[in-house]
Image (cartoon, helix red, strand yellow):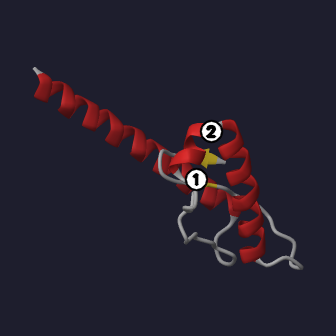
């Protein structure tokens, strides 16, 4: 699992008897309950709203797990570089 500020990468295997939509609904539901119990302020902010976005990306054929893991690592490095660059730009603006 790779957690970013605005999204999560999760590599998992789902048995064929379960649909991707049902597994995602289950995960999102359980995680939302746990997050809102742990961080009560979020419950006030998101009461009656959706904690998760409506969409998700799934690849089921053609990409092996190792390539997905490489992509996740690449994207994390890219995000760190972007955060560093933004930090430097804001530091320069304050001077």
Identify residue for label 1. Answer: 8
Q: Is residue 81 left or right of residue 77?
A: left
Residue 2 or residue 72, whichever sits in front? 2
- On the image, the x and y values in percent for residue 26 come to 77, 65
Q: Residue at x 85, y 76 (%)?
A: 18
Residue 79 or residue 55, whichever sits in front? 55
Q: Residue at x 87, y 72 (%)?
A: 15
Q: Earlier in the sequence, mark 1 or mark 2?
A: 1
Q: Does residue 57 show up?
A: yes
Q: Residue at x 80, y 64 (%)?
A: 13
Other-residue count near label 1 (Cα within 10 Å), few / some / many at <14 / 14–19 / ≥20: few
Q: Is residue 84 left or right of residue 4?
A: left
Identify residue for label 2. Answer: 40
Residue 18 or residue 65, whichever sits in front? 18
Helix, strand or loop status at disc 2 = helix
Task: Report the disc number at residue 41.
Answer: none
Residue 81 or residue 94, whichever sits in front? 94
Q: Residue at x 27, y 31 (%)?
A: 87
- Give the alpha-carbon distance from disc 1 to disc 2, as whole Å: 21 Å
Q: Does residue 3 show up?
A: no
Q: Is residue 9 above or below residue 44?
A: below
- On the image, the x and y values in percent for residue 85 come to 27, 36
Residue 10 sits in which quadrant?
Answer: bottom right
């Amino acid at each position: 699992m790779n957690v970013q500020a605005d999204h999560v990468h999760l590599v998992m295997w789902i048995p064929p008897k379960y649909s991707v939509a049902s597994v995602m609904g289950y995960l999102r539901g359980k995680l939302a309950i746990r997050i809102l119990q742990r961080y009560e302020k979020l419950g006030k902010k998101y009461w009656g709203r959706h904690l998760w976005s409506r969409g998700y990306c799934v690849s089921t054929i053609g990409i092996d797990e190792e390539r997905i893991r490489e992509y996740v690592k690449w994207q994390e490095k890219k995000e760190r570089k972007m955060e560093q660059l933004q930090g430097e730009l804001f530091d320069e603006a304050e001077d």
